Image: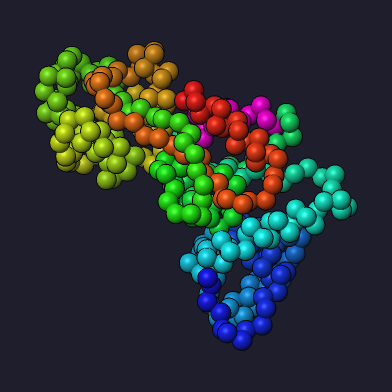
Amino acid sequence: MTHREPNAAPLDLPLLRTFLAVHRAGSFTAAARLLGLSQPTVTTQMRQLEKQLGRELFERQPRGVAPTAVADELAAQVAEPLDTLAVIADRGGPGADRPPEPVRVAGPAELLCTRALPALAPLTGQGVRLRVTTGLTDELLDGLRGGRFDLVIATTRPRGRTLTSVPLGDEEFVLVAAPEWARRIGPDRVAAEGAAALRGAPLVSYAEDLPIARRYWRHVFGVRLTGQAAITVPDLRGVLAAVAAGAGITVLPRYLCLAELASGALVPLLSPEDPPINTSYLAQRPGAPDHPHVSLVRERLLQAGRTW
């Protein structure tokens, strides 16, 4: 629980509403627009709340603000009851005929753009509005706990009791290169010699620590991958583009390079009997307020995930 003095006065509900808007929007200015308040008013309210709590809630950054650990903890405590109150307050009121709030979906950019969004696109015809955020799983799950998102596609199973998750789909990883590099390495050499056949081939990776390739080397070849990447780009679509253009070799999810494999723009360097597979999960906060469009999006993703 967020620390407070034993005899402290109760926290004001309007301050908590403003706090939650800032936490979700990531800036005082954006929260002010959402709430219909002025930016100075939002700033003043957050100072009041920080004074009541005796703790700093947000750190100013060049663009917006970043929540402190205290803010994340407070958001996790107040998001569900405040969202529930908002739903109850709207029922039958003057705004009852307005459209439901947008569904806030987050996940890895590649999976969202190539798989999730095409599956969700038809829902706009049913009035569903989406607000999509891309990022790394750990950061997005923290945002889900804090109420910034409704659903998160996670590349690892969320831990703890604050979130619920179900398997969404499996992605198989494949070692690929452009035809020119496949010829240089030599047909069937990787199957015969293993990782030794790949020495000297430039490696293109998602990050400096070669996370996907390291796992492939360990799982398929049974050896530790050493060396440095020739190119790193924090988007697997960029990795795909570089390798297809002849930059070297890489390991990609098969779903991401199906078209290139079919056209011959990329060539699989090995077809192991037991390729590495990663399961993605669809995560949600338990007890989140009833939102029919969140349910629609969730069911569509789970249905589509069976074909991924």
Asked if residue 210 can be seen in this view, the reply is yes
Name the residue nearer the viewer: 247 or 188. 188
Majority SS type along the magenta span = helix
* Residue nearest the observer in this picture, 64 or 187: 187
Q: Is residue 44 visible?
A: no
Q: Quadrant of residue 174?
A: top left
Q: Which residues are magenta?
A: 112-124
Q: Residue at x 69, y 44 (%)?
A: 291
Question: Is residue 98 highlighted in magenta?
Answer: no
Give the image location of residue 43, x and y in percent. Answer: 65, 71
Query: Who's the residue at 62% across and 84% down the image?
Result: 8
Residue 54: give x, y in percent of width and height: 55, 81
Q: Residue at x 70, y 31 (%)?
A: 124
Residue 13's image quarter?
bottom right
In the depicted structure, whether residue 292 falls above or below residue 75? above
Question: For this view, does 191 lie left or right of residue 31?
Answer: left
Measuring from the top left, give residue 50's x and y in whole percent: 59, 76
